[in-house]
Amino acid sequence: MKNKLHIVFGIVALVASQLVSAQEKDLRKVVFTGAARGLYYGDKIGQEEADSITIPRMNSGHTLVDLGMNIRPNRNTEIQGMVRVRNDYGRFWGSGVSFDIRQLYIKGVAGGVVRYQLGDINYKLSPYTLSNTQQEIITQGPVVFQQQTRLMNYDNFYAADSSWRQQGAAAEFGLQFAKFVKELQFHTVGTRVRTTDFGSINDRLFAGYNMNLVQSNFLEVGVNHVTLFDIEGTSHNLSTFHNPVTTGTLMVKRDIAHWKMKLNVETGTSRTYYEKFEGSPETKGKIFDAKLLGVDASKGLTVEAGWKYVSSDFRSPGAQTKRVNYNYQPSSFGRITNDQVVRNLTAFDLMRESNAYNRQLSSNLMLIQPKYDNITPYGTATPNRQGLTVNAKYVYPAQLFDVVATQLLLHETRGEGTLLPRKFRRSEVKATGHLNKIFGNKEKLFDVTLRFRNDRTSREAEENVRAVDLSTQIFSVGVEYEFWENWDLMLGLQQIKFNGFDYTAVRNNFSEIYNFKEYQTDGNEFMKALGVRYRFSDKSSLSVNLSNFKNNDAFDTTQKYNIRQFMLLYQMNF
Amino acid sequence: MKKSIYFLLFASVLYTSCKVDDQFEGPSLVDLYGDFSLVTGLDISNRNVNFSAGETTTFTAAFSKNVNWKVEVKGLQSGAVKRFEGFSNSIDVSNATWSGTTTDLPMFRAEDCAVQLSIENVADTLRDTLTVVGSKVYQGFVAADFENGWNSGWNTYVQSGANMSFAVQTNSNAAQGGRYYEMAGAVSWDWLIGLVNMPGSAYGSTYYPLTSNPSNLYFNTMLYKPAGIDNGLVLFQIKEDDNGDGMYSTGSEDMYSIQVSLTANGWSKISQRYDNIPTLVNGAASGPIGNGLHEPNKIIEVSVLFLANPTSGYSKTWMDYMIFTEGSALEP
């Protein structure tokens, strides 16, 4: 047996190397990290409707410092603490100053085998079990807008890897084998999603694990299991919520001629139910997602085609929770016109309002905004979708430009309010040109980005039921041009046009549809901005932006307005 | 082998991707937003229905979408009401078949009835008529319906208060048929206004002719509360001859009681499964007086006591159709 199979316990290289290499690079026991910024907004609103009540100018801003201390008491332990000190402009001597603990965790390697982390953790599993889907529209916009979006993502702990910031514990370890199987990896996580009020709300936890068997460089098989559940006995409420999700994954790699091929498959089930809650529903859902990826590096071509099926009853809070809380009311010019109607949340607000975002997993399907995204509002795991997805990327030789194209051809797995399913079609192209390779100094920045997305939702009319036809077009242009040493000129235009009709589902507390609302829209949101940025270094910069946002809604004249914005931003990471 | 796996994988993906459920999610859009139209109007399958012969009649109609609808039948003499309600696109035998029962007492009798169909959010009301040739006959032992007047086997005790009335009344206000029993008066010194004893001997034997299974037997009757009179209490005492000596021995044999405080105006149905009828002492549940067994075949007498707080003044109630049914409570 000893000769046949040698099991070597050790740290899985891919999960532990980061910590080890970091320790090797920097052996200091205490390191200060963090970020600082000063942000100032000067806004002015102009309206088509008469308004003698709303104050047309609004100034706001703050300075803040995230001061972190990274302590390494020994080679296997790391402690990170970060305090945020924030002061809103115009307030001194304690008024408006806030101190918050922004980050606190301990991580390390136990016994040279298990890597663990306690406290604040960023965690991600598969797209159907735990994944933080990016917010609609604005994450793909021109850089002049992205400056603000990145601040907001930073404030809300939204990382580029789609992980969710949670509080709890995580552990990882791996087993390496000499024959037949290369490696067996284990990942497990447990976090506290909600705290009890000692009355009617129970403690709610999220827990899960991933087990991945790496047979070779060409074959991997995995299992993901996550569950969101209430703990009975943590309040006087005897009923408890449970939502386990289990998926299996398969990854196969193979080279065919010039193409490096990779097949990714994920399939699984979900179950949502309550215990000791009479009359509560139980739903069971399933998913199947297969994608075939081909990369021809010699031609700079990457193509991915896939089929997906997500049943209408599939519920996975870790993967379906939205970032944007569409119940949020904008803090800037929250009410407008003489009637002081609520100003609707727009892409302009989504770009810069941190408080419009959600940081915790939701057991229910959250509110969506069909004009921004009616096709994948809950990300990859959006329920009630099936069909074809195609992504392609082409990188021109010498990286002069690259083009990314996406095509989604989906339809519902179960009709909503009628047996006829709605059809969804998304066509998207994004091109980035690095014009410095053609014009001027190749070391200087000169990027131009173009993006166009066309979404359409449709369903034929039936007797007594109107046809559904809702479309959204997003067009944006962005320019970054380094006109002087470290001085950049930034230009951005973005237009979102939406028009048409749909029936939107109204859901109860069990996420069941109990009604439909007629949703008729015809409008556009247009943003343009011009900015100048000075880069002190890769980690710090100063920007001045002028932008104008124009909102039009053919069905609601109160929402016809424009907002001019002046922004001064200094930011630094250290 | 590999090709087979790829083929199976591809086929399964294709299958799941093309399949659409044969049910839809949420309420029907047609019901919510479709136009309403009457596909077929209100019709009645039997316009001269004899419920006493076991006949039924069915109301029918059809609509272009699911709607909240209501069919109401009103007895033109009795004022009895039978109501059918539903949310559907058709009214048919499955949801609107009438066997002569009543929703709002009194019970139907042989009479002409007005029928109307109303639909939520539709202004028009469809109307029709039918005739009840014979009213529904209920299975069970009828202890008192007063249709034949006072049973000479019963006895009564009435206090000498003011405006006392313990008598069978004949008029169209009866819950069933044309007669009911009125109990009324004002007694300022005692809760008891009057009582009626109904011994088994009044029906031709020592005991009530009932089953021995208490879980299958229901006691039912109807009481009427006049508007403005809120102080009446009716106490039914059901006495069992536990030792079989042919008489009830107070304090040593079981007496089960139902106390009814009249709250809703008009006729109300009182029904209780026999084995759920408790022993009451001064209105409160108590331990059994006798052997503690519910033995309906040993019921020797039923007493009906009409009570009111002596300080509360005049009180009045009517009683009708006392019946023991088997299997289920009375559905008038």
Image (cartoon, rainbow, N blue to C red):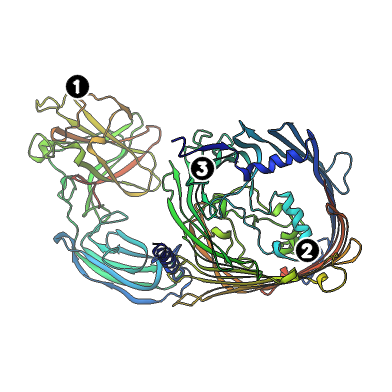
Q: Residue A119 placed where, x, y %?
A: 66, 37
Callout 2 crowding tier (Cα within 10 Å): few <14, some 14–19, many ≥20: many
Residue located at (30% from left, 60% from top): B82
- Evaluate whether label 1 is on the same chain as label 3: no
Q: Which mark is residue A143?
A: 2
Q: Residue A433 placed where, x, y %?
A: 76, 71
Residue picked out by circle 1: B252
Q: Nearer the viewer, residue A569 or B252?
A: A569
SS at mark 1 in the image: loop
Q: Nearer the viewer, mark 1 or mark 3?
A: 3
Give the Cα distance between marks 2 and 3.
49 Å
Q: Nearer the viewer, mark 2 or mark 1?
A: 2
Residue picked out by circle 3: A178
SS at mark 3 in the image: loop
Do we see residue B183 in this rendering?
Answer: yes
Tag 3: amino acid: Ala
In the rendered view, tell whether residue A108 sits above or below residue A411.
above
The chain containing the residue under callout 2 comes to A
Tag 2: amino acid: Val
Give the Cα distance between marks 1 and 3.
89 Å
Residue farthest to the front? Answer: A3
In the displayed structure image, the side of residue A329 where residue B118 appears, left or right? left
Tag 1: amino acid: Ser
Give the Cα distance between marks 2 and 1.
95 Å
Callout 1 crowding tier (Cα within 10 Å): few <14, some 14–19, many ≥20: some
Q: Nearer the viewer, mark 2 or mark 3?
A: 3
In the displayed structure image, the side of residue A198 where residue A33 appears, left or right? right
Q: Given contact means CB atoms under 8 Å apart, are the residues at marks 1 and 3 in contact?
A: no
